[in-house]
Image: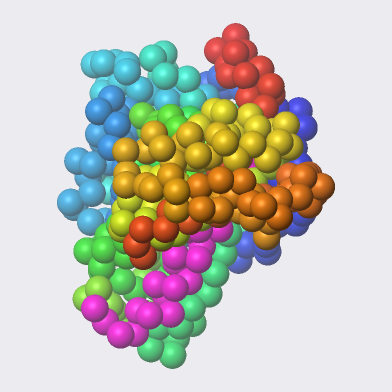
């Protein structure tokens, strides 16, 4: 954890309500960090419905493999998350570590190992000593409490400078339900299916296949639309749990993703996912500026997103923003290399409300002073119109500073 909190950090944290049917505890197992919590245990009093999306990396971590194998069972009683070691690229030792952790968790909670979910984040390639969990999980189960969301978010941090939490409420058939979530991530962020790590839970009574449909749709405009450095993690895990406790208030179980009663819940969930995803970008390693890139006029929405990510992932665009330089020539470059259809002579580019380029050349009314004022802000909107069709997409990124190099140059030392 770096000494200084990101200047883009939230000024305050939401009041995170306890969620019926779920308790949490953290512990310091000394996996990598000294004098800080690095293990999180989430316990569901009754089997909760579960959904998950994971990295599409071809080198996934052992916990990702473990979760994928358990997901078809559709029920969760325990989640164990550790920071400091990703348990990725650890071969047979990695599999042994997940097996031992699952066994310890199942014994501590009193459930089947198919009801346990695991996630790890941190250094890749170093064996994880799972015996460190075996001793603490039993005690953690005894101490677990519902009012523990911020502490839970702190325990899963690596290079994050602040914990990431969000909460929303919605109604299903007139019954109020709550959704809470935590996330971690600051570097190696270019999610492909999910973010680094994020765990979202609700007291709604919703069947697992419905949760999966909601989650798979919800990641597109949220976690899959953010990038810090274009690197997709081996450990990307986003999970959604439903405890079903709202059934006690008379909420009828939702068994179909087409159920009209889901409308408010879906909107609240998507809003929460976007909130968490943007908190990850605002904590981008070394970040000083948040950049929202909107591409319009592309051949399709998919083409617009590819162009937007080409801009967002360009080190030259990101360093120009760090230097508060409205170098729109670099945006032209990023559009051109994206592989999507573009017409040089139809391009228009805006920084904030200032149009800097139009019809394929510098705007005749271009004002250096007005543009510089935009670049000095913490939040910088960039818009590019391709001028070809109706495709549209928005992605979020941050600037690339010397601090990013310093953090990642020292990461393993």
- Spot occupied by residue 19 in the image (x, y as percentages of width and height): 51, 65
- Spot occupied by residue 2 in the image (x, y as percentages of width and height): 70, 27
- Whether residue 281 appears in this view of the structure is no
Left or right: 213 as drawn, with respect to 123: left
Q: Is residue 194 magenta?
A: no
- Predominant secondary structure, magenta span: helix
- Spot occupied by residue 199 in the image (x, y as percentages of width and height): 45, 51
Residue drawn at 19 percent across, 52 percent down? 73
Q: Dividing the image into 4 quarters, which one contains the C terminus?
A: top right
Q: How many marks?
A: 0
Q: Is residue 278 magenta?
A: yes
Q: Which residues are magenta?
A: 258-285
Residue drawn at 26 percent across, 16 percent down? 91
- Whether residue 60 appears in this view of the structure is yes
Q: Nearer the viewer, residue 387 or 359?
A: 359
Left or right: 398 as drawn, with respect to 232: right
């Amino acid at each position: 954890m770096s000494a200084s909190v990101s200047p883009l950090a939230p000024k305050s944290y939401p009041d995170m309500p306890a969620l019926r049917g779920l308790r949490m505890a953290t512990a310091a197992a000394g996996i990598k960090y000294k004098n800080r919590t690095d293990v999180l245990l989430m316990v569901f009093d009754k089997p909760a419905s579960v959904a998950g999306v994971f990295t599409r990396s071809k080198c996934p971590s052992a916990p990702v493999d473990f979760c994928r194998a358990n997901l078809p069972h559709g029920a969760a009683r325990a989640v164990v998350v550790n920071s400091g070691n990703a348990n990725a690229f650890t071969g047979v030792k990695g599999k042994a570590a997940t097996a031992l952790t699952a066994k310890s968790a199942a014994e501590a909670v009193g459930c089947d190992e198919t009801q346990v979910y695991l996630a790890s984040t941190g250094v890749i390639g170093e064996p994880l000593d799972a015996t460190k969990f075996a001793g603490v999980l039993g005690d953690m189960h005894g101490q677990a409490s519902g009012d523990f969301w911020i502490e839970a978010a702190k325990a899963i941090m690596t290079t994050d400078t602040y914990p990431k939490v969000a909460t929303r409420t919605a109604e299903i058939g007139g019954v109020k339900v709550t959704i809470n979530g935590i996330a971690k991530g600051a570097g190696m962020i270019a999610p492909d299916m999910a973010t680094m790590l994020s765990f979202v839970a609700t007291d709604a009574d919703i069947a697992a296949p419905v949760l999966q449909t909601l989650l798979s749709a919800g990641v597109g405009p949220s976690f899959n639309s953010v990038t810090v450095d274009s690197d997709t993690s081996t450990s990307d895990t986003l999970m959604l749990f439903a405890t079903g406790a709202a059934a006690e208030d008379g909420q009828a179980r939702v068994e179909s993703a087409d159920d009209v009663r889901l409308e408010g819940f879906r909107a609240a969930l998507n809003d929460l996912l976007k909130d968490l995803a943007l908190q990850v970008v605002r904590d981008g390693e070394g970040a000083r500026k948040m950049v929202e890139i909107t591409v319009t006029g592309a051949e399709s929405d998919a083409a617009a997103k590819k162009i937007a990510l080409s801009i967002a992932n360009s080190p030259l665009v990101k360093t120009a923003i760090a230097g508060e330089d409205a170098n729109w020539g670099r945006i032209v470059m990023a559009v051109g290399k994206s592989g999507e259809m573009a017409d040089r002579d139809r391009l228009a580019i805006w920084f904030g409300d200032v149009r800097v380029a139009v019809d394929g050349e510098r705007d005749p009314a271009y004002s250096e002073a007005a543009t510089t004022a935009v670049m000095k802000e913490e939040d910088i909107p960039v818009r590019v119109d391709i001028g070809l069709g109706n495709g549209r997409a928005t992605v979020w990124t941050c600037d690339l500073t010397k601090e990013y190099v310093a953090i990642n140059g020292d990461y393993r030392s």
